[in-house]
Image (cartoon, coloured by chain):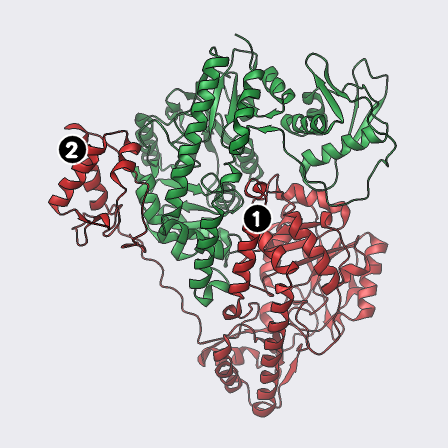
Chain colours: A red, B green
């Protein structure tokens, strides 16, 4: 048994579960129960025992009986008592055989030396102080009902803050009543498809996250890949699918925005066929060189489900995302979510509302945008110096770039990178199994993941792994 | 959802269509629809509304939802309720507003005047300052990787803290590597059954939460009800089921602990048949008069999945729970959960670890135990004075009591309570549809929910609603 808080001086008034049974009176029974608890490991060495009064009240016995039992066990060496420190389990008590051999905690998988996998922001840049301040303010100001069962739509404070923020930052047109809070993009997909709000077949981009395809296929949703070209997904290939899942701001993972003509075309398709567009706005906040690309949702709010989260902008540790829905889907999504909020933490929903309203979210995004832009520039410069034959694409936005490789070299390049302690993925990893057309070789380089101090070494290691010209 | 019903004799001829739409759940949607119908003149002043049961059946929603909606509209002045005359549209309601208000954020659905529904702790007692302090400490001390993708088992800091706490307070024998963090009890059931870790049929107690039965049936798991008697579930009725779901510390909702002989018997059954016990320890911390009842898990950790959460002890707003698993199920549950933590907030996991380790959790539980015990005592005393013919049971532990009623009076008592602005459920609400044997009349009174200052009035209103002797 692992015990992380032995010797903690703060443990007062602790709960202790003991069963008093057997003969010889209560004092003897309590002594036996305490001995067993120590011997069995339930009371670890160093653990502070509850005060006499508390334990006596819990067990419905006299305080003196508890005091006597403690004294006896101190005398026997099971417990120690020191003024000001209470009564504790003695260190070095011989333990009996545990009920079973402890399952070893699996050795913590240490990460690779250089983590250039896409998908995660710099964990060392989480705005701890600002977030803690928002959380504390939110807790202080929350009405009491916030600590009761939650509205499955999510807190209205957050939905209001997001309505304003998404309009301003992403060109999303909505109202709080058409937003449903969720745990992230995958949860949104689950609600829509596992919750039977939508059915397949679903058109998808021919490159994307395998995890999403698996989640859809677990809901028996067939996905139909749309080819990609330099203008993004070939939405002219849309046919009888009921819906299409797109990453219009920054195609994942190839990196380009959906061309304005295609944006208009897909909305036309949705109108003509009664189709629906699922807009995965996974890193829409991070843009560097080009004009901001607003959400497709703004073109026709009744034809687009716009989905975002804080997983790239703040941290995937928070498990907060949102769906901006056409009105006709709101009830069905709420129905799929259940009668009460069962997922997203209410205090953190309120903290995010505060974080957005106070401007801290904008400040954090701005800061990270500068940091990631600088990283991208370093990557591009290093490649220009060390591997000028390698084209870098998809770099106008987001947290990753794509290095185009000579045909047939992707697999060996990924392998060479691993040898140098660099974790990253090749483009093949993201290709839809039924995709047709070009299958270019390339590496997807997530430049956001390493902490700031380790970034230079990661880029250097990467350059060493690239195929020669 | 469209409903059409022909009203009682007093309503001349017309059909009324109610459309339940918009956010905020069914109750809020029904309230909106009724308000619109009154405002638009479709429900004229003086019109008698259909009985809860009829409208609930027509709309396919819970009877309590209808009762709540009526109570709310009575409180708002749209409807009037008089004993013997049913619920009617109030005279003098201003007419002529548009049938459908532009869709704004739905007005915060106010609850009933006196909320005595079971299942929620006193939301006004959430330990805001202590929790905020734990959250801040956790954020400050967390390693950077805590803000990256999370381990689906949950943070090891929390699993260590729970290992110690559950051993001490609940007699649970485990190790951190056999704990998986989740969002609450329903999430645990989902992981086990929707995640195909376990299959049905599953034996359950003949009284329990309908929500859990629905969740299981959505995973095509058949539930087989076990009769209850004064010693708890009749586990001698277990046959070929693969698993049994029990609430051994405090049967939900009838209120008794599982008798020690039955505890041993169900473990014997699991050993003999290779069965599994799912232990729902939903309010194990709250016990008043009797000796603590430890977890069944302690009897045989390889035969029991022990499931708990902070939903009763702290707040359902946090979405944090845990599964203590037999070793052979750990990998399958993690597989069902996914490669990364997609649900429980990592910062709040760390905050809970700090909250437990610092002793704040024990202090809060102890404070709430005193408060709830006092409330229970007030309830029992009020009943002894005002309704001495009503037996109160299930009061030695937990956050609710059961008032036994004369046969055939439950339904009218629930209705009488609603008339007095008291929301609560009858026992029938919790009965398994295939249950056989006695179906006693009773009211489930959740005494934890109202804020402290409102509790006296709630008990008074309840007493006024009870059937005369």
Tell me the SS state at disc 2: helix
Q: Is residue B405 above or below residue A429?
A: above
> Residue at the spot x=28%, y=54% of the render?
A6
Does residue B110 appear to the left or right of B460 in the view shown?
Answer: right
Give the crowd class for mark 1: few <14, some 14-19, many >=20 residues within 10 Å: many
Percent from the top left, x then y, of residue B234?
A: 39, 23
Q: Quadrant of residue A334?
A: top right
- Residue B312 appears in the rendering: yes
Q: CA distance from mark 1 to mark 2?
A: 47 Å
- Residue B258's disc is none
Q: Are marks 1 and 2 on the same chain?
A: yes
> Residue at the spot x=66%, y=48% of the render?
A156
Percent from the top left, x then y, of residue B58?
A: 72, 26
The chain holding disc 2 is A
Relative depth, front residue between B202 and B374 = B374
- Residue A28's disc is 2
Percent from the top left, x then y, of residue A281?
A: 68, 63
Percent from the top left, x then y, of residue B54?
A: 71, 21
Q: Is residue B345 above or below residue B445?
A: below
Tell me the SS state at disc 1: helix
Outermost left residue: A75
Does residue B452 appear to the left or right of A36 in the view shown?
Answer: right
Q: Quadrant of the N terminus of chain B?
A: top right
Give the crowd class for mark 2: few <14, some 14-19, many >=20 residues within 10 Å: some
- Residue B172 appears in the rendering: no
Relative depth, front residue between A40 and A64 = A64
Q: Is residue A63 above or below residue A117?
A: above
Residue on which disc 1 sits: A346
> Residue at the spot x=59%, y=52% of the render?
A349
């Amino acid at each position: 048994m692992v015990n992380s808080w032995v010797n903690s001086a703060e443990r007062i008034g602790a709960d202790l579960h003991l069963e008093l049974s057997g003969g010889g009176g209560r004092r003897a029974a309590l002594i036996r129960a305490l001995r067993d608890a120590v011997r069995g490991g339930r009371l670890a060495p160093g653990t502070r025992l509850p005060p006499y009064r508390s334990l006596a009240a819990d067990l419905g016995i006299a305080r003196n009986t508890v005091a006597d039992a403690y004294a006896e066990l101190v005398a026997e060496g099971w417990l120690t008592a020191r003024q000001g420190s209470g009564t504790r389990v003695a260190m070095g008590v011989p333990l009996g055989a545990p009920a079973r051999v402890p399952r070893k905690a699996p050795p913590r998988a240490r990460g690779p030396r250089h983590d250039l996998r896409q998908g995660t922001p710099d964990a060392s840049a989480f705005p701890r102080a600002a977030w803690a301040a928002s959380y504390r303010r939110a807790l202080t100001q929350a009405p009491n009902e916030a600590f009761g069962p939650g509205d499955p739509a999510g807190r209205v404070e957050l939905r209001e803050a997001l309505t304003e923020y998404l309009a301003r930052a992403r060109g999303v047109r909505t109202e709080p009543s058409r937003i449903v809070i969720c745990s992230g993009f995958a949860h949104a997909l689950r609600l829509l498809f596992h919750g039977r709000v939508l059915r397949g077949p679903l058109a998808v981009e021919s490159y994307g996250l395998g995890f999403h395809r698996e989640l859809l296929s677990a809901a028996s949703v067939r996905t139909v890949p749309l080819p990609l070209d330099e203008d993004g997904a070939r939405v002219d290939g849309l046919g009888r699918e009921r819906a299409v899942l797109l990453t219009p701001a920054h195609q994942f993972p190839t990196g380009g925005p959906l061309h304005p003509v295609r944006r208009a075309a897909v909305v036309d398709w949705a109108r003509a066929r009664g189709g629906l567009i699922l807009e995965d706005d996974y890193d829409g906040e991070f843009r560097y060189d080009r004009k901001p690309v607003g959400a497709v949702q703004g073109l026709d709010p009744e034809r687009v489900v716009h989905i975002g989260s804080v997983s790239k902008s703040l941290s995937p540790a928070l498990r907060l995302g949102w769906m901006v829905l056409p009105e006709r889907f709101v009830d069905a999504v709420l129905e799929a979510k259940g009668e009460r909020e069962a997922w997203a933490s209410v205090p953190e929903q309120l903290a995010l509302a505060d974080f957005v309203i106070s401007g801290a979210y904008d400040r954090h995004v701005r800061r990270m945008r500068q940091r990631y832009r600088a990283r991208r520039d370093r990557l591009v410069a290093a490649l220009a110096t060390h591997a000028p034959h390698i084209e870098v694409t998809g770099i106008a936005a987001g947290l990753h770039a794509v290095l185009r490789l000579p045909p047939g070299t992707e697999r060996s390049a990924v392998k060479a990178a691993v040898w140098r302690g660099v974790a990253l993925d090749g483009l093949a990893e993201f290709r839809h199994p039924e995709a047709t057309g070009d299958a270019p070789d390339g590496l997807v380089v997530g430049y956001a993941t390493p902490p700031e101090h380790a970034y230079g070494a990661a880029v250097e290691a990467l350059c060493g792994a690239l195929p020669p010209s």
